[in-house]
Amino acid sequence: MSRVGHGHGHSHALSEEPASQRVRTLLMWLLVPLALATIVGAALLYPFGVEQKTGAEVGLNQTPVEAVVTGLAENCGEKCVAITVKMTDGPSPGQSITIPSVKGPGAPSFKLGDEVVLSYSGTQPQAAESYQIVDYQRGWSLAVLALLFAAAVLLLGRWQGLAALGALLLSFVVLVLFIMPSILAGKNPLMVAVVGAGLIMFVVLYLTHGVSARTSTAVLGTMVSLALIGVLGAAFSALASLTGLDDDTANLVRLLGTDIDTRGLLLAGTLIGALGVLDDVTVTQTSAVWELRRANDKLTWRELFAAGSRIGRDHMSSVVNTLVMAYAGAALPLLLAISLAGRSMGEILTAQQIAQEIVRTLVGSIGLVAAIPVTTALAALVAVRQEVTPIAAPEPEPAEPSEPEPKTVKRAKPEPKPRPARIEGDLYTGYDPDKGPWLRPSGPAARRAAPARPAPPARRRSSGSP
């Protein structure tokens, strides 16, 4: 499985200050020779003037024809089904033919309305024997998925996402227009992969993350890691006697009729497959070191390297697991097929097809692990020589005008009212106990008719008590 370098939406270069003269000079001396070597290698390896062989020239005389399933009939045998299709292009568009197809486990199941692809041998356009159903049409579904992917990247990354999509497109251009033609023309697959990976690396990283000191440092780390993967892959492929000849590679060599370095083809797939993950590791480590430097410009090279390495350890475990699972997932059908043969685990792991996947996985993982300290050391070396502006502390927000505190009005205490003078004298004024009990008049008329009583004689009382 190979994965072309992918562009992440890191906006590392957006807020970066210009590099100092010392940093620019250092990066120029390190990167310019690598860029020139990549360009010269691409010019030497590209198959100028070599015509690519067509399918007919290598014995592939089959022409694809699109058709639609219009009928199904199980009248051609116990394990056979007759499928009627109507061709929409090819030598006889609009014509309907009936083609027998195998029915049973492992065979495709068709239904009415399925859009299929026929293989036309190029002999008799009207004869059903000249056609064979080979696949489904998947163009529209893949196009919808590609549009959803592009929309998701643009929605999240915006202009940075657009740059990532452009970098991805250019990666496929390099793969299709340089790597594949050069290998098919008989060039050394490992050298082609190294040069092609260099082209992809320069294009993807600079287009996605911008031209900056950070990106240049990530490019250096990626190049060193790719070189390590290539050296280890070549050494252990030779030690393990890996030939790189599986079923697909053997068929390719037989069709081309030329001598292709199949072991180099195996190593080329390893380099290209690891390139995408290396992009993620190197850019992330470079960004971590740069942010540490901006947060504290007093850190030395050793302190930056130590802090960045601690960050890289967490990243390392997830990245290695990603690469291992990717290769294991690609080889899962092969693992299942070999396990059914009743062979021991040791025999399964040392078989040619499994051993080459193990070498690819472990060599790629070693390169990824090595990319962390290598890139961190390079980033620390460059960052300490760059005049960075420390992150400014956010200005305090202006305080909102506070409401004036309500003034407390002290009220004057009311003057105490003068206490009434002490009542002295007889409380029963108008009543003479010597005249008997006092009777309340029964009504107003009785009170008016009552004769006026003479005032009782004054009684001498002591002050304060009756």
Image (cartoon, helix red, strand yellow):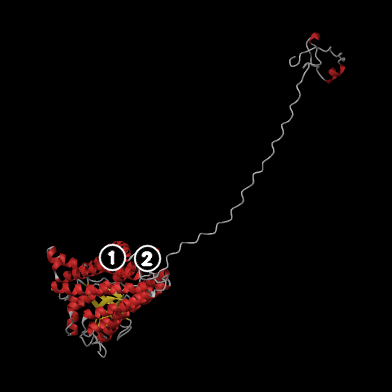
- Circle nearer the viewer, 2 or 1: 2
Residue at image coords 21%, 82%: 188
Q: Which of the pair 79/150 is nearer the observer?
A: 150
* Residue 81 appears in view: no
Q: Is residue 420 above or below residue 407?
A: above
100 with respect to 19 (left or right): left
User: Which circle marks residue 319 in the picture?
Assistant: 1
Q: Amino acid at mark 1?
A: Val
* Residue 205 appears in view: yes
Q: Are marks 2 and 1 in contact (CB under 8 Å)?
A: no
Position of the N terminus by quadrant: bottom left
Q: Is residue 177 above or below residue 430?
A: below
Q: Quadrant of residue 208?
A: bottom left
- Provide the secondary structure element on which disc 2 rests: helix
**Mark 2 vs mark 1: which is more N-terminal?**
2
Q: Quadrant of residue 240?
A: bottom left
Is the residue marked by circle 1 packed among few (<14), some (14-19), or many (20+) residues within 10 Å? some
Q: Amino acid at mark 2?
A: Arg
For the residues marked 2 and 1, what is the alpha-carbon distance in whole angstroms? Answer: 25 Å
Q: Which of the pair 361/462 is nearer the observer?
A: 462
- Provide the secondary structure element on which disc 1 rests: helix
Residue named by callout 2: 293
**Where is residue 156 drawn, in percent x and y?**
41, 68
- Residue furthest toward the bottom? 49
**Where is residue 175 drawn, in percent x and y?**
29, 79
Is the residue marked by circle 2 packed among few (<14), some (14-19), or many (20+) residues within 10 Å? many
